[in-house]
Amino acid sequence: MTTTSAASRQHTLRERNLELVARAVFEAPEPPSRAGVAATTGLTRATVSTLIDQLIGARLLRELPAVADGRAGRPAVPLVPAGRSVLGLGLEVNVDYLGARAIDLTGAVVAERVVPGAFHDSDPAEVLGELGRIANDIARDTHDRGMRLAGARLALPGLVDARAGVLDVAPNLGWSSVAPVPLLGLAGLPVEIANEAKLAALAELGGPGPAGAGAAIPDSFLYVSGDVGIGAAIVVGRELFLGERGWNGEVGHVVVDPAGPRCSCGARGCLEQFAGKEALAGAAGLAADAPLADLLALLGAPRPTTADAGGDPAASDADPPTTAHTGLDSPASRAAADAAVRRAGQALGSALADFVNLVDVHTVVLGGIYTDLLPWLRPEVESVLAERVLAAPFVELEVRSARAGAQAALTGGAHEVLRAVLAAPAAWT
């Protein structure tokens, strides 16, 4: 019994030290050497060297060319996360698209597919089966290129019981009491489910490697994901606040006008009926499934997305353009679009003010369609927040655009898989 207990403790210590060493490399602002890792972790150089050899052998880390620093002894060999080795897979079912994105330990996207569709009142088995085929195609492709999928996170727009693996309800999909994972048909691949907005919020924090996109984000913020539905996530101290069941953040179903239109959830006057993508399109005189570019065209010249702007996140916060667009609209439709966005901004500001008053978080990050619409939404949102947030005279309320890019829940899902790898690297050695 004593021998077994000692062996168990030794095994546990090795696992803990592997995680310490891996984190020291992944979280370092600059690629560290083995000596640097030893200094950071407090482990001996011999122990660090052995563990790093194991992590390199598992293709979790790799060495860069040696760098001479002018001092006596061997040149330092920098260590970095290994690219194109172990992957996380983000999957998503949204009302108007299916998506899959594979990301490696360096944060690079190595495979991606986003397929548009119309999934209102759809058949879960049919939709999830199609997403599973997309995921299997990516799994085969990456395997053939010598990479390994560590697992997947499936983002869904609704109340998700992640512990039970059940989507309790997704009003805009028309789904309830669905166990999605078996319907994907991804045999042998660990898959967990999560709410779309929560995964998108985690994408704002960056990946498991050196601080990137997440470096500029406050430690606490409210993330709001705008699409056909509107979801939210509360991040406190760089961790999700989940509540008892993880069902918080349903800002799209905050009632902003009790006499307003009927929502898909059954209530009247929910935020989604004023600021959701389809509601905005309808109020602007467009078809419900019109692309966001059509609404932007009515508002003026379409602004470039973050990707079109060369990855400059600040472009999303620029002033609205004044250049006329080439002709989809009449003065009446332009006025209707302006009125629709003003109304949406007022409704969104009202719902956000309630959240800020309740949770005491003073940075609001707007993602999804709101990233591109922020220049037109901002005046109304900020005006309502200033009027209705009790603490407004004493704190600086910030409304900013999301920086994680399109379909952010795919990125957040893949990052969560890779964080799990980093938390237990012994499983890969």
Image (cartoon, grey):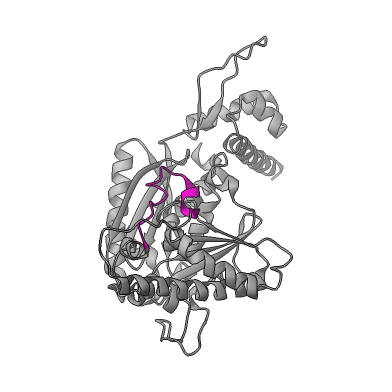
Residue 213 image position (x, y, % from top left): 53, 46
Corner quadrant of residue 233: bottom right
Residue 311 lies in the magenta stretch:
yes
**Whether residue 377 is visible:** yes
Residue 58 image position (x, y, % from top left): 48, 33
Corner quadrant of residue 236: bottom right
Vertical placement of residue 233 versus 87, above or below: below
Image: magenta residue range: 300-318
**Whether residue 195 is visible:** no
- Say which of 97 and 146 sits in front: 97
195 left or right of 242 in image: left
83 left or right of 328 in image: right
Vertical placement of residue 264 versus 44, above or below: below
Q: Residue at x 53, y 49 (%)?
A: 420
Corner quadrant of residue 177: bottom left
Number of marks: 0
Q: Residue at x 29, y 54 (%)?
A: 134
72 left or right of 380 in image: right
- Say which of 142 and 70 sits in front: 70
Q: Residue at x 51, y 74 (%)?
A: 346
Outermost residue on the top side: it is 72
Quarter in which the N terminus is drawn: top right
Vertical placement of residue 300 versus 71, above or below: below
Q: What secondary structure is the magenta-colored segment mainly?
A: loop
Residue 149 image position (x, y, % from top left): 40, 45
Residue 297 image position (x, y, % from top left): 32, 62
Residue 391 lies in the magenta stretch:
no
Vertical placement of residue 427 versus 200, above or below: above
- Say which of 75 and 142 sits in front: 75
